[in-house]
Structures are given as C-alpha cells and as structure tokens.
Amino acid sequence: MSISTTIKSIQDIMRQDTGVDGDAQRISQLVWMLFLKIFDDKEQEYELLDDNYTSPVPERLRWRSWASDTEGMTGDELLDFINNDLFKTLKDLSFGPDDDPRGFIVKEVFEDAYNYMKSGTLIRQVINKISGIDFNITSERHLFGDIYEQILKDLQSAGNAGEYYTPRAVTQFMVDMVNPRLGEKVLDPACGTGGFLVCSIEHIRKNEVKNVDDNAILQGTISGVEKKPMPHLLCITNMLLHGIDVPSTIRRDNTLARPLRDYTPKDRVDVIITNPPFGGIEEGGIQANFPASFRTKETADLFLILIMTLLKPQGRGAIVLPDGTLFGEGVKTRIKEKLLEECNLHTIIRLPNGVFSPYTGIKTNLLFFAKGEPTKEVWYYEHPYPEGYKSYSKTKPIRIEEFAPEKAWWENREEGELAWRVSVENIKANNYNLDIKNPNKVDEEHGDPVELLAKYKKLLAEVADTREALKHELMAALDRGEA
Amino acid sequence: MTPEAFFENFGHLVDAPNGVQKLRELILQLAVRGKLVQQDSTDEAAVKLLERIRAEKERLVKEKKIRNANPLPPVIAEEVPYELPHGWEWTRLGNSGQIFNGNSVNESGKAALSKNTNGLPFIATKDVGYGRESLAYENGLQVPLNSKEFKIAHTSAVLICAEGGSAGKKIGITDRDICFGNKLYANEVWQGINPHYILSVYMAPDFYEQFSSRMTGIIGGIARSEFLLIPVPIPPEKEQHRIVAKVDQLMALCDELEAKQQRTRTKLTSLNNSALDRLTSARETDDFATAWQFLRDNFNLLNTTPETIVKLRQSILQLAVQGKLVPQDPTDGPASVMLAKIKAEKELLVKEKKIRKYDPLPPVTDGDTPYEIPQGWEWVRLGDLKRVVEYGTSQKAHEIPRGVPILRMNNILAGKVILKNLKYVDANIDELPKLYLKDNDLLFNRTNSYELVGKTGIFRGDDDKYTFASYLIRIALFREFIDARYINLSMNSEYFRKTQIEPEITQQCGQANFNGTKLGNTLIALPPLAEQQRIVAKVDQLMALCDSLETRLTKALGKSEKLTAAALQALLAA
C-alpha cells in the first residue's frame, strides 16, 4: 500500500475515535506516532553503524518493544500504557541539549504532544498501519516529504498567523540562487516545516557531499527556529528523514523574542533563506527587543532587521516579502535604508499574484542580498505567468521550470522586457520606495493614437487578407458542388 | 441563403461573435459529406477498402492475434442522415479500427505513476483538447515501459472522451504511444483508413449528434457497444488523404483569422483609449484641436463595439467638467459671485443656529488643481458648497415592505440612485425625520471594495419618503446656487476618481474607506449656475445617444451571431 493511502486509512480509523476532534488534533496525534516510528527506524540504522549505541528512550518505551508486534498490547491496557507510562516518562526525560541531543529531541517532542485518542483498540489499528511503513527505504522517505507538505497544507487554517506554505518551486529557486556551500552555516529563522532547510540540505548534498566526513560537516551547519509546536515537530521529523541525525539545531522558539543586542558574532551565519510570516502582528513585548527606530508590529519587517543582524559579513540572504514592505513608509523606510546601506541588495524578483494561492493572493517578491557592502544598484526581474495562465491555482501551481529564464539571466544580466535596474540614488530620491514597476513593459494605452491607428488599420487589412483567402478556398470547394 | 449571398456577406459573417468557430464546423461538415474536395472516379471505391479490412480482420482472428467479435449489423437506409457521393460508403464506426478504452487509475495509482521518470505518458481526459490541439503528454504521469497492467494506444490512435461533461467533445490524436484513462476510447484504425480523417469525423457536428443520442445515465456516457454502432461515412482511401490535406489548410487559415481578430479587438481598445485620453488631457488649444480632429475623422472606426462606448462616456463627462462641452457665456457672471452668496447664507444659518459652526476649509492652491479651467470658473472644495454632509442610519433594515425604505450602497449605480431592491426600517427610529432624503440629495458610498468605494448618485424622488444607510454619505447642497446634477456628474468623472478619491482611500481588512472630512476637501471645478445647467442638459443628451448606440451595437452583434449560424446551416442544406 502506498503511503498516501496508508495515511488516509489512518485518518479514517481516527475519525471513529471519540477523543479526536477535527483535523488539527488528528494530525497532531498522527505526528507524534510517526515521530516515534521514524526515530525507531533511524535507531536501527545507528545501531548498525555504532555497536555502542544506546537509545535515550527506555527499552520498554521503544516502538519495537510495544508497537511493532501487530498482535501486541491493545485495548485499555494500551491506552493506559500510552497515557501513564509512555508520555509521562518521555516528557520527564532529563536530557539537556548538550549531554544527549537525541534524548533532548524526544523530550521536546513529547512535551508538546498529546494523546487525543480514547480507544486503545483503535490506537492499535493505527499503530499497525504505521508499522507497515519502512522509513529506511529511500523512495518511501522521499515521498514522505511530500506528505508532510500535504499535512501542513491540511493543517493551515489558511494564513491565520500569516504563515503560508512556500511552493516547492520558489524554495528550490531561492536555494539554487543563494547556493549554500558545504561548511557554511545555513539558518531559517522562521522555518515552518523546514522546506528551505531540506532544500538546502539536498542542494549541498547533491553538489558537494562526497563522504562520511562531508556528511558530518553538513549535519552541524543546518539550523532553524520555529515558533509553533506542530510545524516544529514536523520540521524535526522532516530533518530526521532527510538524514540530519540530530536535529537539535531546530529549536522551538520565537526568534524575535530575543533582544537584538544580545546576539553576538558567534550567532552569525553565512546563509539565511526564509519566508517569514507576513501581516502577522507581534505582541508589544517583542517590539521592545528592537531598537526604538525600528519598532513595528509587522512580523515580516522585524525578520528583515533580524536577518541583517544575523548575517556574517559577506553572508548571503534571500527572503520572501510582500509588496507592502517594498512601498511601505515610516518604519519600513528606515528598515530599507538600513538594508541598502549595510547590504548589497542586488536582486528583486517580482512574482505575480497567486503564487501562494490559495492561502493568499497578495503579490510577493524575492529579495536577494549580501551583507557587507552598500547597494549600488538593484536589478529587478518580473516573473511572468506562463503562456496561457491568468493566475496560479491549486491545480496549476508555479513550477521550477518557469524559473529557467531567471537562472540563465542571473549570471549574465541584461536589461530587457522583463528585467531592469535602478540605481541606489534613484531609490533614495524616491524615499526608499522599492516598489518600482517594470519600465520596459509596452504600454499601448498611452501611445500615440496616430501610430496606433496605423497599426490597427494594418491589422484590419491583414484580417481582410486572411478572410479573403479562406473565402476563396471555400468558394473553390463549393462552386464545384454547384457545377 | 444561396452560396452567392453567403460569400457576398462573408466578412460580416465570420467577424460575428463565434463566426470563425461556426465556420470551422461548416468546413468539417462539408468535409465528411464529400463536398469539400473533388471526387475522382479513378479512385478505388470505399466498398473495396471495407472489404479488404474485413478480410484482414478475419485473418487476424484466425491467427489468434485479435479476439473474435460478432460482425456489426450493416447500416440500413433509415439510419442514413444524408446522401453520400459516388464511391463513398456508410459503415459502422466499429469497422474503422480497433476501439478500446484505457485503464482506471485511482489517486494512489496516480501518485505511483508520478514517481516514474520515464516510460509512456499516461493521458487522462483533462490532457485531451477539442480536436486539433496536441495532447498534454508532459503531465507528470508515466507508465513504465514493461508494465503489463496498462493498455497501450499506439501512434496515430484517435481518442474521444466517452463519459462525463466532455463526452463526445474532447477529441485528439496521438503522436506517440501512450497509456490512457478508462473514460477515453482509442481508435487504432485499420490500414486504408486515415486517422486524421476519423479525427475530422469525430469533430463534425453530425457525429456529435449521433454520439449524444446514444448517451445514457445521469453523468452521461456512451457504452462501447453503442459507440461502435455509430454510422460513419467512408470515402475512397485517396480521397481521405485529399480531405485531410484540405481540412488542415482551411483550419490553419481559421486559426490565423481568429488570432488576428483577437488582436484587432485589443488594438482597438488601446487605440480608442489613447485617442480619448489625448482629448481629455490636452492642455493647449492646438493639442485639443488635433486630438478632436483625429477622433472625429475616425469616429466610426473607433465606436464599433459596445466596449469602446464605456470609455466614450467617461470622456464626455471629463470634457464636461473641463468646460469644453458647452461654450462659456460672459453674461453668466463669474462663479465667485455665487460662492460669496453661499458664504453669506451659511453665516446666516450659523447665526440662526440652523447649522453647526464650522472651521473654514483650507484654501485651494494652484498646486492642488488637477487641470486648467475656463475664465469665470472656480476650483472649490465640496465642503464649501454643502448645506450638510452626514452619514446614514445604522439601524438594522428588514425586507418586509413596512416603514421607511432605506437606500443602501447597491442602490447607487452609474451616477443614479435606483429605487429598486429596497429594504426598510421602522419609521419611529431616532434618526428620523432628520435623515429623510430630499430631491436632488447626493449619496456617496464611503465603504465598499476598492473599485466601488466613492461611487456617487443623485437621488431623484419625493422629499421625506426615503432614508439611507450608514455606508452612505448624504451631501445636500445650496440648491439656489448649485445644480446638484452638475456636482453629481463631476463626482462621477475620471479626474475626480483618479485625483480626488483614489489617493485618499484607506484600506483595511479588504474594505476600502473614504470619510466625510476627506469628502469635504475634494475639489470641484465650478462654473456659473446657468452654465452648470447647460452642461447637464448637454451631457444628458449625449449620454442618451451613447445609450442608444450601445444598445444597437449589442443588438447588432447578437443578430450577426444568429445570422451566421443560420447562414451556415442554410448553406449546408443547399
């Protein structure tokens, strides 16, 4: 049975349980169970590689001990075990992040999780379904990444906190352009379920990881922070699946909660790629963590400031921002001034409406910059809809192939119908408004009527020509019929 | 209609809405009835061809390469919809090729197919077009080459959708081997049958008629056994090739014509917009004269579709408030005299405590004014012309026709207040009688979507009968000095929208807002009262002409579409 059908049948079983209410709880329930299973599968791998491996999970609580036997514990006995032994013990594991990072993760996961199901028999049915999946098979693991994204989509009650699932194509394009290298520290300060991180891992792995040592380097350089428990849990599991053995670098926290001045050079990283929540509003206390001149409630703006602080000199950043930030004034103006002075904002890709459909229709932009030198000019590229599209939708999402022209243009930039550049002086003169429209778009509406008339008449004549040709063909065919 | 009359009016007919589409249908109908290309008496008759196919089939059955199937009954005279040319033959579709449906694949099956990186494309109904388009081969689903579970339709198989809303309409032909969905029938034609000819047969309206009469079920589908029975006309093999070539050629011409028609439509819109913008934005007399000359010379060319009339109306309003529509008359006296009178009247009212004391509005400076106005006119703030500006009642309205009708934002339409679709409030609410509308009050919509916020209409009706909702602002003017109809048309003009309203709209939670204070500050170009009245009369007259032109154009388009359909039908019958 394929994984998606397994997941579906699991959800069907859970629907029968009186304790589980709604999609959110169902997914939450599913996620901790999957975590435990994946963790156990991973441990099998560790045990093969390391004879001295000891699990941070007490033997009786490991998946293999109580779950994998399909005829094992069930009914009230199982329910009692989960509620009063499994959860209690794992929540109270006394591991710190440094002495046993793996144990720490398990503890963290179970601190945030909850067993909603009330029927031990149904729990057993679910467990047996999950036991049927082997996460050590690469193909299943890969498909699982997609299912995660699916779960996330289900989970999102559409952007209530400004969080949107970033389309795969956008993630991929940003990572490709920023090009994180092996050994560079990569951070996503609002990592969600880890889309950018996974993409970065795959990017580095494909290009540079040749041996076990390389892999070990990669493990320590990927980090992320997520505020909400469920995406955090999904992110950790996602990291495990993508070969990050100890995803203790994925913290559950609000990155913005730490005062900006408390960050030291050792917190700085080489690469930041992120899609911060837009339109989210941070509580007043959070704002106090920022210098007075940059205080704002807009989450996306606060993240932009944070990223500038967190990048090393020469560090590279890529961020998804709404149009509002580009043209906004007040605090936004000051933030953009700082960005242009401290970083080289070399590229802005302007995306059309609907890239984030159905979560939001707002227009978004991809900003690429490097810290350490001031901006001299900004290149803009207007990403067009593919031929025949009026908008993107759930069934017609943005695709990575569409970015091929941008990729070709990236290293070899020329102004054209879709690309233009603006000097920093012009931007300053315009009060740091970065919302600059494409000047090369042909605007016929305001052209010279005489010229347009000539074109129109020519076209009319062409229509007449084609029409005549068609008419003669038909006449030739039909006249014969008359004869 | 005779062919002569048809060709005489060919231009009209194919330029009608859907004209080219109808023409395509005609071409296909002619093709399958043997009227499109010359018959050649030296061609081997289709009877022989069908005989050969039958023999070939028997051989394959004998060799166990295909399954034996009962022969289809011959086509009888009652079934024949029209006479065929010499050498042609009616047969059942099932005799033209091997016809079979594809494989049913569920969601998980699709997920599995999407993982394959090579193999045969899996084509479902959504990947099939309406005849001549290429199939969407690159749809992400592929069947491994060695798969035993999937049936294969080879190159040049003709596909047709057999079930659902697209049944009989979605049609295509393969240019490579594919696997395909169970709602599609593939026809792998026998040697001697041209697959592109079968494609034309499928696309011709005659065939669809046969097809749909055999559909059953709620979803609408055709059983394979029924599908095989559809009678199809088979020409001699050589003639099939000639038909295919001719259809290709004519369809290409149709494509070209359609594309060009589309381009002329967009070109016309931009031409019209640019010509009218020149006129309304001209600052110098010479520019205006040139722009007008251009418009006048090309007036008939520009105003041939209902769409361009919309812009024409806008421009008339704009010209009106620029003082370019009617001549100025020096005996009217300057508008400033009226303004002084309004001011005096207002001060009196304040003294009598009839209206509240107010702060003077900021004076109008040259930098604020959006365009030049004639001698004797004044730029004024709307707030300086008002007796009152007030918001409506937030009382809950109900549908029962009892109490006082309350006008809401949907009652404002195209500068008018429409007294239809009314709701009602009780007559004894606190805000009444204060919020009763009087004849000639203006209603301004202060909260709506961005596109609609700011729409304004003039209330024409009995005093003290209607009230208005809180999303509307009422503007009552000093009627002795101001013609409310003139202010209404100013507020509906393009400059007002672009320079006075849009820059000040605030947006929150998907709602666009505009408040009474801002409304008081908006600028109006005010002519003397007599000229206001002349302008209103002229605009009314021109708008009536626009209305009738638009109605006639719309009617003409509708007529020409019907005419085309009728003409082609008649031609086919001839």
Image (cartoon, rainbow, N blue to C red):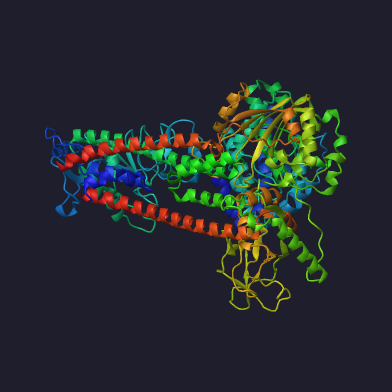
Observer-nearest residue: A60 or A217?
A: A217
x and y percentages locating residue A81 in the rendered image? 72, 52
Instruction: Using residue A90 as the reference point, say whether residue A417 is left or right of it.
Output: left
Give above or below for A62 relative to B342.
above
- Taking the view exactly as shown, the residue that stands out farthest to the left is B41
Instruction: Using residue A83 as the reference point, say whether residue B548 is left or right of it.
Output: left
Asked if residue A90 can be seen in this view, the reply is yes
x and y percentages locating residue A409 in the rendered image? 60, 24
Observer-nearest residue: A375 or A433?
A: A433
| Residue visible at 53% across and 44% down in the picture | B276
Asked if residue A271 can be seen in this view, the reply is no
| Residue B253, quarter of the rendered image | top left
Observer-nearest residue: A385 or A142?
A: A385
Observer-nearest residue: B239 or B174?
A: B239
Give above or below for A410 relative to A96.
above
Quadrant in which the C terminus of chain A is drawn: top left
- Taking the view exactly as shown, the residue that stands out farthest to the front is B331
x and y percentages locating residue A143 in the rendered image? 57, 38
x and y percentages locating residue B83 in the rendered image? 16, 48
Give above or below for B5 relative to A197.
below
